[in-house]
Image (cartoon, helix red, strand yellow):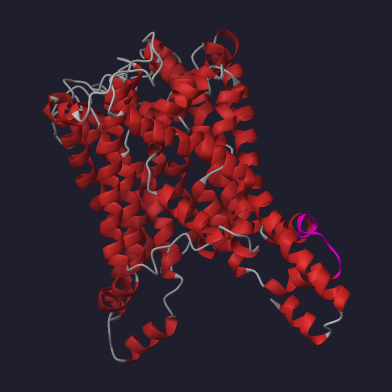
Amino acid sequence: MSLEVKTNVAPSKPKVMTMKRLKRKEKIEGWLFVLPFVISALVFFIGPLLVAFMLSFKEYSYLDMVSMFEAPWVGLSNYINAFKDSTFLRALLNTTLYSLGVVPIQLFIALVLALIVDSDIKGKTFFRVAYYIPTVTSTVAVSVMFLFIFKSDGVLNKILSFFNLPPYNWFGDTRLALPTIMMMAIWSSVGLYMVIFLAGLQDIPSSLYEAARIDGANKLQEVLYITIPLLKPTIFFNLVVSLIGTFQVFDQAFVVSNGTGGPLDSTMTVVLYLYKTGFRDFQMGYASAIAFILFAIIFILTLIQRKFFGEETEF
Amino acid sequence: MQKGFKISKVIFYLVLIGYAIICLGPFLWSFITSFKPTSEINNFNIDFKTLSAKNYIFLWKEFPFARWVFNSIYVALIVTLGNILFNSMAGYALARINFPGKKALFLAILGMMMVPGQVVMVPTFILLSKLGWVNTYKGLTIPFLTSLFGIFLMRQFFTTIPKAIEESAMIDGLSRFGIFFRIVLPLARPALSTQFILMFTGNWNSFLWPSLLAQSEEMYTLPVGLNSFYGQYYQFWDQVLAGVMILSIPSILIFLIFQKNFIKGIATTGLKE
């Protein structure tokens, strides 16, 4: 911008030429800077996305002798079959229950911890780091660790026995397996949402709190009438990120059930089922249809986010 | 009044310490167990005389853990460096350079961020197997060298640094690439270290793609290797948990080293909006 101003100050001919050249150079440079990304996105994202859309209307197996372009079209039957497939419906139900359980609990814990850590206490850094450590740990490592702690003769049941509670078969019981994975997910991602809440809390001007204190408000009132309303954008951001993330749950369910979604499909999730149909049964057309159903769900969740945020604050 | 204030302080500390125990307890218990002999794993007392590093030595010598550690470091480093370079370049162009199609490209990035990665899993796998990249380092790294979220993060950051610095460098005759590498990138250190943590730990911990792409034992990354080791030796909890530690300690260390910049980076890159 200011370069153009300069040309007005000294509009000698050769200089204008250089400016034109600079402008043209800028166009080329812009594309050079984004080129690695654009190539990568075309080859590994846009192309596969179009192919996946095509496959979702075909019956195709990776092991077929014909190429995927010659594979027979089957219209909408992959999509229709998905909604008649009791395992898929179970996976959808499990994933929804998982999401409805994990999202509110993890955001509530994250918000409470963020508020306390942000207040006037000692050892802030230690607590922040401690709470974030589960988030940087591999979900595979976390799953194996929980399998150890939650095993029927493990340390958790031992602790429960001190309180005269009976031992549970956490991962083996069809009613408990999914809730146990939910606990694991909450444990391992509270730190992430706490950090984002902390970042949001820094933006609330302290003058508001001072004014409230002069008016005689107590801590609880400050939180309810100042912090929560002003933190709304961050709360909604976390809500949507967490909803989208929970609908893509895979690692924990895979490790805990050894890739089967068991016991009796009680830990089968949408992405685990997608993995199973695509890469165990090689029904790649069907797997693509499942992928687009997942996409549709996440897309709707994102639209809901936009409703709350309004266009301009979306990103 | 004064007394009520103190009681709330006590409750605060109880909550904080309680949750810290919930967070760190499983790690500590697993860490201790990984030094125990197999016969002691169900013993809830710690007999310090029996603790030893033999499980780690055993995993290192008798199982391909050393190879898996190498694979994980190699893959995570290439992917992280690629992301840092390419995401910064793209983010910089989107924030600063005027080129035709810039707005459309940015909108496309926002749109693509809505698509869950699993949607492209099947065709990408077919593509990689046609290229002969399945079970190779190429397949584990090249498709993952850029990230939509990383580009978004860098663009947000670059819009916050003052333009005047670049303009004076341009008048001094520095080329666009010179400005980018010598002036802009050094200024972007907080954003870059945030990106480093996110990309390195994300790739180090990544499980779904490597479990598809690494098919033979010598190509496994640590999460894939640990999952397969657990599947076979799940009774030997002392050894399995030593594997858990080998997998989790490096990413925790990376986080501890960069954590100071991390929270600052999150706060300044607009991740929260």
In this image, A257 relative to A11: left or right? left
Say if residue A31 shows up in the picture: yes
Q: Is residue A144 magenta?
A: no
* Residue A56 horizontal/vertical position (percent): 29, 29
Residue B14 position within the rendered picture, expressed as x and y whole percent measured from the top left: 33, 57
Would residue A253 be seen by someone viewing this image from the given angle? no
Q: Residue at x 48, y 33 (%)?
A: B205
The front one of B143 and A102 is B143
Q: Is residue A199 above or below residue B117?
A: below
In the rendering, at what x and y percent does residue A150 appear?
A: 27, 28
Residue closest to the eye, B266 or A56: A56
Q: Is residue A246 left or right of residue B70?
A: left
Quarter-wise, where is residue B56 in the image?
top right
Task: Report x, y in % for residue B227.
Answer: 42, 20
Q: Which image quarter: residue A219?
A: bottom left
Q: Quadrant of the N terminus of chain A?
A: bottom right
Q: Residue at x 32, y 62 (%)?
A: A235
Bounds of the magenta segment: B172-179
User: Front-most of B47 and B17?
Assistant: B17
